[in-house]
Amino acid sequence: MRLPTFFNKKRGNRRTGLPAWGSLGEGIYHAVLLVAGLIIGVLMLAGIAVPEWRINNQFIGVDGRLIGKGLARHTLRDVFGGAKYSWRPALLVQYDVGGEEVESWNTVHSSETHETRDVAVHQLDDWKLGGHVRCWYDPDDIETVVLKRGYSWWLWLLTLLLPGALVTFGATGLLHSLKSWGRSEERQAAQFGRLLETLASPLPESVGFPTIPACDNLVNSPGMMLRFRLPTESPEFWSLIGSGLFSGLWNLVVVLLAVNVGFDVAGGRADWWLLGLLTPFVIVGLASIGLFCRQLFFVTAVGPTHVEISGHPLCPGNNYQVLLSQAGSASFRKLELFLELEEQATFRQGTDVRTERQIVWQFLIRCWKDVEPLPGTPFEAEEQLQLPSETMHSFHSTHNAVSWRLVLRGVPKRWPAFERVFPVVVFPADRPKSNGENK
Amino acid sequence: MKESHQIDQSPIDSYQIQQTPRINVVFNHENIQYSGADPLRLHYVVEGVESHSVAAIERSVVWYTEGKGEEDFGVVFFERIQLDKRNDGTKILPKSVNTEHLTGALAVDLPHSPLSYEGIIVKIRWCVRIRIFFRSGRDFVSEHIFFLGNVPLAQLSEKIRS
């Protein structure tokens, strides 16, 4: 008798064997996580959240009198026999419950204990013996009394976060296992794939053309000379935002540190180690400001690029007019306008998710050399573009993409080279003709 | 008419099953080359298995990606034929299916996209899959490639390589 195999035989990208065992293993793993999350959640709710909620909602408030005070010491022994102490103020309160005088030491939250005895003693000084205090007692146990109410939000966050993450991870994994139980990947895709694609797909599809991204956002801006103005995907713009964010956050931290150090220096308690440690932070902060200003100046000095096209979406074998407009006062050694086909693959490498890009086809539409813009007038040029008759259409799925784009690469005379990308969508050759296309 | 080759079958596999199925598929286009919106019709024959040992057959027309990225997958046609419940009257089998000889046929209009593509780091393949579920709980899948569209191979030019 053969025992069942706990793994499937992999043949290339295909698997054969007993998929039910894989689903069972995954299901057990996620069920354990779900149960662990529920148990931890119930324990944390019962031990932390519910008592705090009862104090704020069920304890009865009365006026009492402080008749004694002291210091409570909590001893925590470790496995090596060492002891660690924590301290908290202990207050003896006298209060009236239905005509009965009750005397009880107050209950405090563990967050109100202190590792330093002096801090607890200092807090005790705030309470005056014989003074009147507002207190709240437990109607189920009248000797349990507190002098302070309120919620500790971080405790609630902790209560919800850890078990919440386990429950979410376990429940979604369990649902996935149930979904795939005894089902082939084709059946899963046929039953659930469309729903998941709709939820997960970052780009909407063109109607009647699965996996071809919709080009609604590419045709909603009319051009000045030609029919459509294409939106840009400028790498410099994203690097400007990135360097701005980095510079802002870094310098915020530096300012917070510097304020503390400044107070110390003003109070005559200069900590030279801290000052020395702060110096490289300040240097990095100043350098990031410089880099951000340089990029900002570069983006504004080169000026915006506009590309207009006579028809969209594009179709293989068709001709289109393309208008390039480069504003700004910068002179260029070279401007090149390309039509490119780029493949993009997203994959997991260890715990990282990586995306690789590869330009697989490139056509130079036009190259201009020594471009000198006239004052107040952008550089403009209109060119004809013909798509090859047999070529791949635009394709976009969850982890893979084949994208068409017009790319302007420029080399300014006084600035580093730049690149501006204008995505376009190409349909298969055998689709019905759209407006703006010329054979 | 052309008979396609089965790619996922080997009698010396480590996952030995009591019977080794052979699935032959005949496409309506001899060169297994189709265009967008073309009707795909095919006939398949499962050989080498006893019909009473088969619990279900799934027929599907799918595309999937290969290459550097994670696999993406789409189904344009899917049908599951439950054979082991046919006696209790709960299942009505399609006329194209013969349960005694395990043969069948399917027809589907292909979509306009995605076209078959042989890129550098992204490849798109179309295929017909016939998956047999045995009563023992095991399954066996046979994949038969065909081509949608006529996109040429992507080849890096020297300029792009550099």
Image (cartoon, coloured by chain):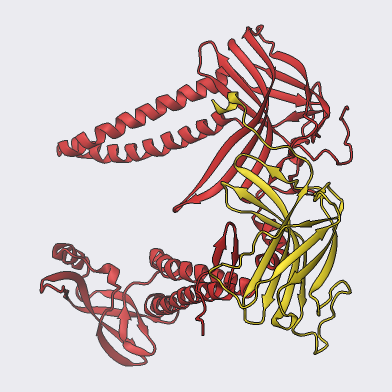
Chain colours: A red, B yellow
A7 left or right, relative to A258: right
Q: Position of residue A377 (x, y in %)?
A: 69, 11
Q: Which residue shows up at 72% across the image and 24% down it? A: A307
A397 left or right, relative to A351: right
Can the viewer see residue B106?
A: yes
Which of these two is toward me, A246 or B143? B143
Residue at the left extreme of this rendering: A81
Q: Which quarter of the image is occupied by the C terminus of chain A?
A: top right
The quadrant holding residue A119 is: bottom left
> Can you say whether A409 is above or below A128 in the image?
above
Which of these two is toward me, A146 or A209? A209
Q: Which residue shows up at 65% across the image and 7% down it? A: A375
Q: Position of residue A316 (x, y in %)?
A: 80, 33
Q: How many marks?
A: 0
Which of these two is toward me, A341 or A409? A341
Q: Position of residue A116 (x, y in %)?
A: 16, 63
Q: Which residue shows up at 81% across the image and 48% down it? A: B31
A32 left or right, relative to A278: right
Can the viewer see residue A56?
A: no
Q: Position of residue A380 (x, y in %)?
A: 72, 14
> Can you say whether A62 is above or below A264 in the image?
below
Q: Which residue shows up at 86% across the image and 30% down it? A: A437
